[in-house]
Amino acid sequence: MVATSFSEPTLATTLVDRVRADIVSGALRPGEKLRLEHLAARYDMGKSPLREACCRLASEGLVVIEDQRGFRVAPISRRDLLDLTRTRQQIEALALRDSFAHGGLDWEAQVTGALHKLERTPLRTAEGPDTLSPAWASAHRALHDALVAACTSTWLHRFRSVLYDQSERYRRLSVAYERDGRRDILGEHAALARAALARDVERTCALMTEHFARTTDLVLEAYPSLDTER
């Protein structure tokens, strides 16, 4: 009984993480119907925990609950992307300022280490030039998280996490268009880290705002057919 009480939350959390990862990566496509019988086979889980996982992801905005019709992956749109980008720019700036105010040597070491790892992790996989490396995606998130790691607000961290996952769905669309020489993705991250380590909060916030906007512009350029309504 004791083992069960500890394992069930762990299994539920793991399932939510797996479904979330597939939505964020695009393995479960925007607008796709989430049929529980198909998900049960995909994740080797029963319908009840999958229904709970979908409900939890709906609270994060990654899944839409349809009355009497089950669940669907949240759609994407130009309107949503622009709103998401503006909100993320504002929340990120708040978290950065708080992180700068409280970060010490450990925080600086975390930023330095995260940049070092990102710079040495291949962006693409061996499968092809348009396939993002999961290791790079993990290192990328680690650097962005490191920059705000000293932020003391639990709510800002929660909001950031939700916004990051939502933004990642769009950012994945730009991967195939980041290899034409128009963007120095590693250079952008190095500049962010250098500004942070120099304790230049205004420059770091400005660079982050520009960093987010550049990704958004690239997605909109690559996918002009994104719906105008969500």
Image: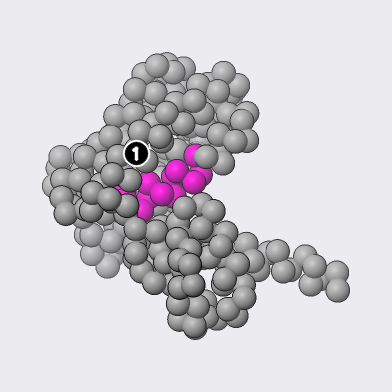
Viewer-closest of 3 and 92: 92
Task: Residue at 39% x, 59% y: name it.
Answer: 74
Indicate the position of residue 102 as horizontal and vertical percent values: 60, 21
The magenta-colored residue range is 160-171
Looking at the picture, does residue 54 appear above or below residue 185? Answer: below
Task: Residue at 28% x, 61% y: name it.
Answer: 131
Task: Residue at 34% x, 29% y: name it.
Answer: 209
Secondary structure of the magenta portion, mostly? Answer: helix
Indicate the position of residue 170 as horizontal and vertical percent values: 31, 50
Q: Quadrant of the N terminus?
A: bottom right
Secondary element at image label 1: helix
Q: Which residue is mark 1?
A: 83
Say which amino acid is labelled 1: Asp
Asked whether 163 falls inside the magenta stretch, the response is yes
Viewer-closest of 106 and 221: 221
Q: Is residue 63 visible?
A: yes
Task: Residue at 26% x, 54% y: name it.
Answer: 173
Looking at the picture, does residue 186 appear above or below residue 67? Answer: above
Indicate the position of residue 144 as horizontal and vertical percent values: 45, 38
Asked whether 169 falls inside the magenta stretch, the response is yes
